Amino acid sequence: MSQTKQDTAPSAEQIIYADVLEKGMFAGLMLMITTFALYLLGVMKPAVPLNEISRYWNLPVHDYLEAINHNFLHLEHPVTGWNWLGLINYGDFVNFVPVAILSGITIICYGAVVPGMFKRGDMTYTIIAVLEVLILSLAASGLLAVGH
């Protein structure tokens, strides 16, 4: 059986999802370029000086966090989870903002399609999309963190 043009046309939700994803991706990319330029050009002072960063590249993440905390940040505990938000005044930490935006754009995309599905009465997909938003948001929150 051959498919007709109507069978392959994207749904309204697919178009909304794609539009939001495209805008979010471009915004995140532009912000990433901007924050990286601020960091590289020295407009924002980094927590770890550029000339010393290569000393830490070979360390496992835990050891890296301990070392930069001990040598540069002098905080009570190394930066983990969302604690980096308190350090966005440093050029190397402001670069995390666009990464967080790019990581979270899927949540926004799902949230954008929920009203149309609900209005159309498609409760199965509405519930799935709402659960997707809730689960991804909970995972991103760090409340489900495991390990130490």
Image (cartoon, rainbow, N blue to C red):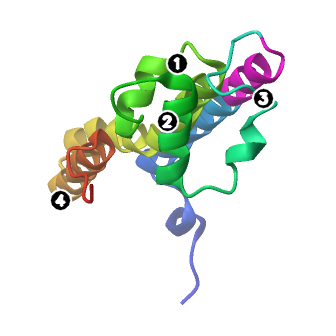
Q: Secondary structure at mark 2?
A: helix
What whole-number distance in Å separates the C-alpha atoms at marks 2 and 3?
Answer: 22 Å
Residue shown at 54% from the left, 40% from the top: 67
Q: Position of residue 25 (x, y in %)?
A: 62, 37
**Left of 141 or right of it: where is 49?**
right
Disc 2 and disc 3 in contact, CB within 8 angstroms: no
The span from disc 4 to disc 2 (Cα, nearest Å) is 29 Å
Residue type (three-letter) at the residue carrying disc 2:
Ala
User: Which mark sits nearer the N-terminus, 2 or 3?
Assistant: 3
Q: Which residue is mark 2?
A: 100
Instruction: Label 4: state its secondary structure.
Output: helix
Q: CA distance from mark 3 to mark 4?
A: 51 Å
Residue marked by disc 4? 124
Q: Position of residue 40 (x, y in %)?
A: 81, 23
Residue indicated by mark 1: 88
Name above or below for residue 32 compared with residue 119.
above
